[in-house]
Amino acid sequence: MSDYYSTSVAGLPLFAAPARAPAIQHSRTSMAAADALTPQKLNALQRQVVAFLHERGEHGATDEEMQNGIPMDPNTQRPRRRELAKRGLVVEAGERKTRAGKSATVWRLA
């Protein structure tokens, strides 16, 4: 067997942690805003998600419930919840049905 498969992808630059938050590279103000973000800071949208989940307590909320309760567009809310989960601030807390009857993950504060 070739040693091609023994190489770990973790060390490749493609999988390295980003040096800065995402930014529009041709926008000076976007890059400045990205540089101002640190792991200790939450942006305004993330704070809205945290505040909503704090109100919900142990009951938590599905993405759909957060989108309706905050209110926040799904394409804005889901990435913010995912960012919070990657930082360990939000955790899975079970499942419940959506309005459409589908199973959805319930999220709560860690």
Image: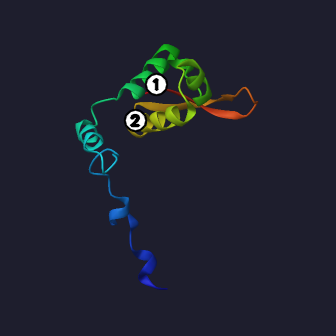
Q: Which quadrant: the C terminus? A: top left
- Nearer the viewer's eye, disc 1 or disc 2? 1
Residue bearing the label numbered 2: 88
Asked if the residues shown at circle 1 and circle 2 are in contact, with their CB atoms under 8 angstroms apart, the answer is no
Residue lying at 32% horizontally and 64% vertically, measured from the top left: 13
Mark 2, Cα crowd under 10 Å, few <14 / some 14-19 / many 20+, is few
Quickly name the residue at label 1: 49
Q: Position of residue 37 (x, y in %)?
A: 27, 36
Task: Name the kind of residue labelled 2 in the image.
Answer: Gly
Which residue: 65% across, 33% down?
A: 104
Q: Is residue 36 visible?
A: yes
Residue situated furthest bottom in the rendering: 1
- Residue 6 is tagged as none
Residue 17 drawn above or below residue 30? below
Q: Measure how far apart labels 1 and 2 are at the Cα level.
A: 14 Å
Residue in front for this viewpoint, 43 or 4: 43
Label 2 secondary element: loop
Q: Quadrant of residue 74?
A: top right
Residue toward you, 69 or 10: 69
Secondary structure at badge 1 equals helix
Which quadrant holds residue 64?
Answer: top right
Q: For the view shown, which residue lies furthest in the right direction?
A: 101
Rendered position, 59 above or below 25: above
Across and down, in percent, residue 50 comes to: 43, 23
Up the image or down, 63 lies above or below 2; here it is: above
* N-term-proximal mark, 1 vs 2: 1
Relative to 84, is 29 on the left or the right?
left
Three-letter amino acid code of the residue under disc 1: Val
- One can see residue 61 in this view: no
Q: Residue at x 32, y 44 (%)?
A: 21
Q: Residues within 10 Å of mark 1 (few under 14, many from 20)?
A: many
